[in-house]
Image: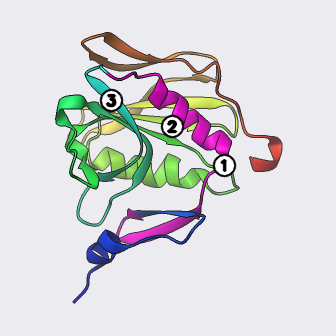
């Protein structure tokens, strides 16, 4: 009997679409706009090769057997990255970044569904970039509770740097946001 997990392993979305496997469902969306991808690309370029931390775009994260979302950017320590894996184990992820896509209800996936999934998988930091209003929100796990939950530790408008709270051999990782642009009003 073929399971959804088996189907996901061989699934190829149609041209013009991207797919994620979240909560036992394969979710397809139209490819994001260039403005959306420009922010993710900018983040990956701010962490140059040779650092102990690496940023990768469009990486799948194995949260559990029926959830493997494809995050816009994933930051992990170079030594932990499994080069032969399709999806990275959640345990190696230091920071997960989602850029909210344009569209009326698109924000729900990043602010609600993925927040809950990443929190449950205990990914230490979750950065939500929201071009609808030109803002960002940094969430960090609060381990003082019985079950760790995300607490918003910082937020700001595009233009304000983001100290991610993670360091490597070069120092603390700080993202510059001065080149990020909000969506035009037609995409909000």
Colouring scheme, one of rainbow, by chain, secondary structure, one colour: rainbow
Marks 3,2: beta carbons within 8 A: no
Q: Going by the image, does 89 lie left or right of 48?
A: left
Callout 3: few (<14), some (14-19), or many (20+) C-alpha neighbours within 10 Å?
Answer: many
The Cα atoms of the two marked residues, 3 and 2, are separated by 18 Å
Residue 76, given in percent of the width and then of the height, sits at 28, 33
Give the residues in magenta: 21-49
Q: Nearest the camera: 166 or 121?
A: 166
Q: CA distance from mark 2 to mark 1?
A: 17 Å
Residue 54: image tag: 3
Instruction: Tell me which residue sits at (73%, 40%) in the image.
Output: 183
The residue pinned by badge 2 equals: 128
Is disc 2 in contact with disc 1, using a CB cutoff of under 8 Å? no
Q: Residue at x 18, y 35 (%)?
A: 80
Q: Residue at x 33, y 58 (%)?
A: 68
Mark 2, Cα crowd under 10 Å, few <14 / some 14-19 / many 20+, is many
Foreground mark, 3 or 2, reads 3
On the rendered structure, is 144 left or right of 106?
left
SS at mark 3 in the image: strand
Q: Quadrant of the N terminus?
A: bottom left
| Residue extending furthest toward the right | 186
- The residue tagged with tag 1: helix, strand or loop? loop
Residue 125: quadrant of the picture = top left
Circle 2 — which element?
Answer: strand
Residue 71 location in percent, x, y? 42, 47
Total labels drawn: 3
Asked if residue 182 lies in the magenta stretch, the reply is: no
Q: Dot 1 corresponds to which residue?
A: 33
């Amino acid at each position: 009997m073929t399971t959804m997990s088996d189907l996901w392993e061989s699934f190829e979305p149609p041209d013009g679409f991207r797919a994620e496997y979240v909560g036992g469902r394969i979710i397809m969306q139209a490819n994001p706009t260039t403005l959306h991808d420009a922010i993710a690309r900018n983040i990956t370029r701010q962490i140059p090769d040779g650092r102990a931390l690496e940023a990768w775009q469009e990486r799948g994260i194995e949260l559990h057997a029926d959830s493997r979302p494809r995050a816009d950017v994933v930051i992990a320590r170079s030594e932990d990255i499994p080069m032969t894996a399709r999806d990275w184990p959640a345990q190696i992820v230091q920071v997960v970044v989602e850029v909210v896509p344009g569209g009326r209800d698109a924000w729900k996936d990043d602010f609600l569904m993925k927040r809950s999934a990443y929190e449950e998988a205990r990914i230490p930091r979750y950065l939500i970039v929201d071009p609808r209003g030109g803002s960002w929100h940094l969430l960090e796990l609060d381990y003082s509770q019985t079950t760790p939950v995300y607490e918003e530790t910082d937020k700001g408008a595009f233009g304000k740097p983001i100290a991610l709270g993670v360091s490597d051999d070069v120092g603390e990782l700080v993202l510059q946001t001065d080149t990020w642009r909000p969506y035009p009003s037609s995409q909000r």
